[in-house]
Amino acid sequence: MHKKCEIPDIDIPNKKAIRFGISTLNDAELLAILLGVGSKDLEGLRLANNLLADSLTMFNLASKPYQYFMQFKGISKKKALKLCACFEIASRYARRKHIILESTYAIDSEFLYERYYSKMANLDKEIFVLVVLNKNRKIIHEKTLYKGTSVGLSLSPVEICRAIMLEKGYYFYVIHNHPNDSLFPSENDLIFTDELLRVSKKFGFILLDHLIIGQSGYYSLLNKKEK
């Protein structure tokens, strides 16, 4: 009689979580629990690893629509929606956490990088975001001013200052991503930043930083350094 393939108890995600805590599970094991493919733990882990292999990271999975998950054998619409719901809960928690942090911590370049990394780092098109602060350096407005391609930005500093004026702002940050993951500013980035500094001063606004976000970190154009 052919023996059924078994997994040692220590390697079964459910039992491992109960014994050592949910935080000890790796990404594949967490996914396997969410997928809940019957009682076949080996099948669940294999399916979870297939998902991660296809999308490369858990972060990439979090932005997928439910139709994506249904491409994989063993994932029904119900399971696909369950995964999307879990990722959405995590996303809402992260957004709520940022709101709480804003009321207790000073806004700086590092804070904004952490806030926008998940939204911008893996995009295949360039976007440009304006973050407006009041005189107490609290965020009062955030807006995507540009969505385009890798060709570059099509914004003028005057347009940005008008947007700040409408929100009755004082300080501001601008942020854009580099789809090619190069953090080094282009010549156009440098020219644009210099012009934005000059024009915003005329309007009475203060540019605190211009950040370039990529998968590997960010570059601060005002501090001239990469992190």
Image (cartoon, grey):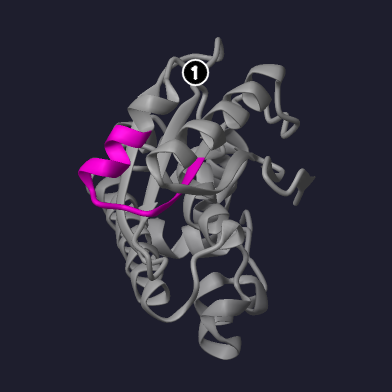
Q: Specify the farthest residue to the front.
A: 202
Residue nearer the viewer, 180 or 44: 180
Dot 1: what SS? loop
Magenta residues span 161-174
The answer to whether residue 42 shows anywhere in this view is: no
Q: Is residue 118 magenta?
A: no
When the figure is inspected, residue 121 is found, relative to residue 153, above or below; the finding is below
Q: Give the percent coordinates (x, y) of residue 95.
A: 35, 62
When the figure is inspected, residue 4 is found, relative to residue 194, above or below; the finding is below
Q: Give the percent coordinates (x, y) of residue 160.
A: 37, 32
Residue at (28%, 37%) from the top-left corner?
163
When the figure is inspected, residue 42 is found, relative to residue 124, above or below; the finding is below
Is 218 on the left-hand or right-hand side of 89? right
Residue at (38%, 39%) from the top-left corner?
203
Q: Residues within 10 Å of mark 1 (few under 14, many from 20)?
A: some
Q: Give the percent coordinates (x, y) of residue 208.
A: 55, 52
Residue nearer the viewer, 58 or 176: 176
Q: Specify the farthest residue to the bottom.
A: 19
Query: For mark 1, what is the residue?
Result: 153
Residue kind at label 1, given as amino acid type: Leu
Q: Give the percent coordinates (x, y) of residue 4.
A: 59, 59
Q: Is residue 170 magenta?
A: yes
Residue at (34%, 52%) from the top-left corner?
83
Residue nearer the viewer, 95 or 194: 194
The answer to whether residue 124 shows anywhere in this view is: yes
